[in-house]
Amino acid sequence: DQPIHYNEAIAALHNLCTPGKTHRSTLKFCPWLEKGGFKVGIVGVKPLVPDAFKAMANSDRQGVLLGNTTAVRQLFVRQYTKFLKLFFHKAYVWKFLECNGEMDMFYEAKDGVREIIDSYESLLEKCAEVESGPDRSDT
């Protein structure tokens, strides 16, 4: 068995996402992973399948795909921006109010989504701090 190199794994993943003229359908990721918010890891050791997992197929290779969950922030920001544009012009608000809705619900929804975006923003900042690490001049 030949080892799989990182570039080959990325190329294979790209081919699955954009198969071209083949019988395969396109591999679809969640919208926040489509732009590459993931890491690929290749391990040269045969995976161990515990007896309790009889449904797992035996394989000579294993891999890992870690998705960047903070990338979902972009999805919320995009939807939040669209909402604000519509809400600024009071588009569809009348229809909601006609059905006994309350204007405060729009403000609560706007604030709730903003809190989600802020939470992801703080996660991104923490990740950036961890990745940049402390000053490593002492090593």
Image: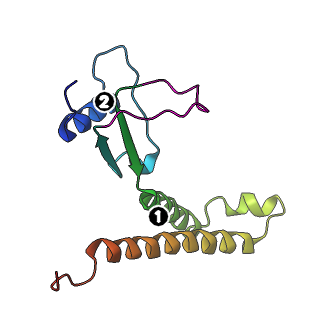
Residue labelled with disc 1? 77
Residue shown at the point (58%, 25%) measured from the top left: 55
- Position above or below: 52 against 57: below
In reply to whether residue 53 is colored magenta, the answer given is yes
- Are the residues tagged 2 and 1 within 8 Å (C-beta)? no
Instruction: Say whether residue 19 is magenta.
Output: no
List the single residue furthest toward the right: 100
Label 2: which residue?
Answer: 18
| Prevalent SS, magenta region | loop
Eyeballing the image, is 104 above or below 34? below
Q: Position of residue 134 (x, y in %)?
A: 27, 82
- Looking at the image, residue 41 lies above or below residue 75: above
Task: Name the quadrant of the N terminus.
Answer: top left
Disc number lying in front (2 or 1): 2
Give the x, y percent position of residue 98. 80, 60
Q: Residue at x 36, y 52 (%)?
A: 37
On the image, which quarter does residue 86 sit in? Answer: bottom right
In the drawing, does residue 62 fall left or right of residue 82?
left
Amino acid type at image mark 1? Val
Quadrant of res 27: top left
Specify start and end residues of the magenta stretch as a single range.
45-58
Total marks drawn? Answer: 2
- How far apart marks 2 and 1 lie (CA) works out to 27 Å
Neighbourhood count class around disc 2 (C-alpha, 10 Å): few under 14, some 14–19, many 20 upward: some
Which disc number belongs to residue 95? none
Residue 16 as seen in the image, left or right of residue 102: left
Question: At which x and y percent is residue 74?
Answer: 43, 60
Residue 2, horizontal then vertical, whole percent: 19, 27
